[in-house]
Amino acid sequence: MKFFIDTASLKDIQDAQDLGVLDGVTTNPSLMAKEGIGGEENVKKHYKAICEIVDGDVSAEVISTDFEGIIKEGEELVKIDDQIVVKVPMIKDGIKAIKYFSERGIRTNCTLVFSAGQALLAAKAGATYVSPFIGRLDDISTDGLQLIQDIREIYDNYGYTTEILAASVRHPMHILECAKIGADVMTGPLSAILALLKHPLTDIGLAKFLEDHAKVNA
Ligand code: G3P
């Protein structure tokens, strides 16, 4: 399973890259705003800076919600770097735009997906990635992981090549369950990735090894 980091923080992206396990980055307008990145030129420079840190795909989201606007923005975004994937919302004009982009070899990430029907449409339109938001479904007492399972089954039934990018991942158990189900990619915060490292028996075991080593190497 590929690991993407869901942030616009250059520091967190660099930390995940340095860990050696990073396959890509996803951003969204809220994450860009959190870093204080506004204005067309600043946004483009920030995406370029992200692409220079990470080797893999970088999802850059459009703001437009009409077909012409999405196309114009997407075509500008992909000029920034070959690593850019155009992130398009799951709306009618978004699906039309994904179809348009896929016919022209421009890669897309269909975002704000909350149902298997939406994921089926995204695949039929030729999305490179589909982003079901599992954490936000869990937030409203709906099983986000079940959605990943349903999409996996549907895509496998018909051999759709759209990659399932589990988004809105909040904690390490989300990552593990996504891996068991067979999500192609997960995107989450650095904290969820680093939490995979943790086990109390690892800490206790290491402390004991170092203590025993010290006894005979004083
Ligand atoms: O980038 C999309 C998604 O991962 C957002 O996550 O935590 O805001 O629900 P979250």
Image (tube, rainbow, N blue to C red):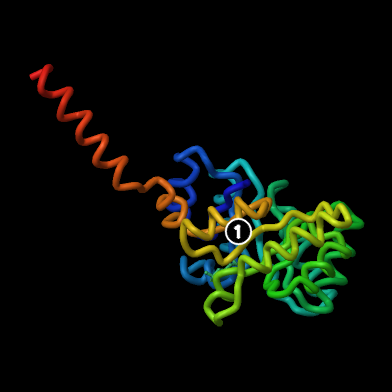
Q: Report the residue at 63% width, 67% height from top.
A: 40
Q: x%, y% of residue 94?
A: 80, 73
Residue identified by numbered label 1? 26
* Quadrant where ligand 1 appears: bottom right
Q: Is residue 206 above or below residue 53?
A: above
* Residue located at (61% from left, 70% from top): 144
Judged left or right of residue 194, residue 8 is right
Q: Residues within 10 Å of mark 1 (few under 14, many from 20)?
A: many
Which secondary structure lies at badge 1? strand
Compared across the picture, whether 182 is left or right of 197 comes to: right
Extreme residue in the top direction: 217
Most distant residue in the left direction: 218
In the picture as drawn, the residue positioned furthest to the bottom comes out as: 140
Residue at the (26%, 34%) spot, across then down: 206
- Quadrant where the C terminus is found in the figure: top left
**Mark 1 C-beta to ligand 1 under 8 Å:** yes
Q: Is residue 23 left or right of residue 96?
A: left
How many dots with numbers? Answer: 1
Q: Nearer the viewer, residue 148 or 9?
A: 148
212 or 39, which lies in front? 212
- Determine whether 161 is above or below 66 in the image: above
Q: Position of residue 115 (x, y in %)?
A: 73, 74
The image quadrant that residue 211 belongs to is: top left
User: Quadrant location of residue 197?
Assistant: top left
Query: Which residue is drawn at the image coordinates 60% and 58% (left, top)?
Result: 26
Residue 164 on image: x %, y %: 71, 57
Q: State the residue in front, 65 or 38.
A: 65
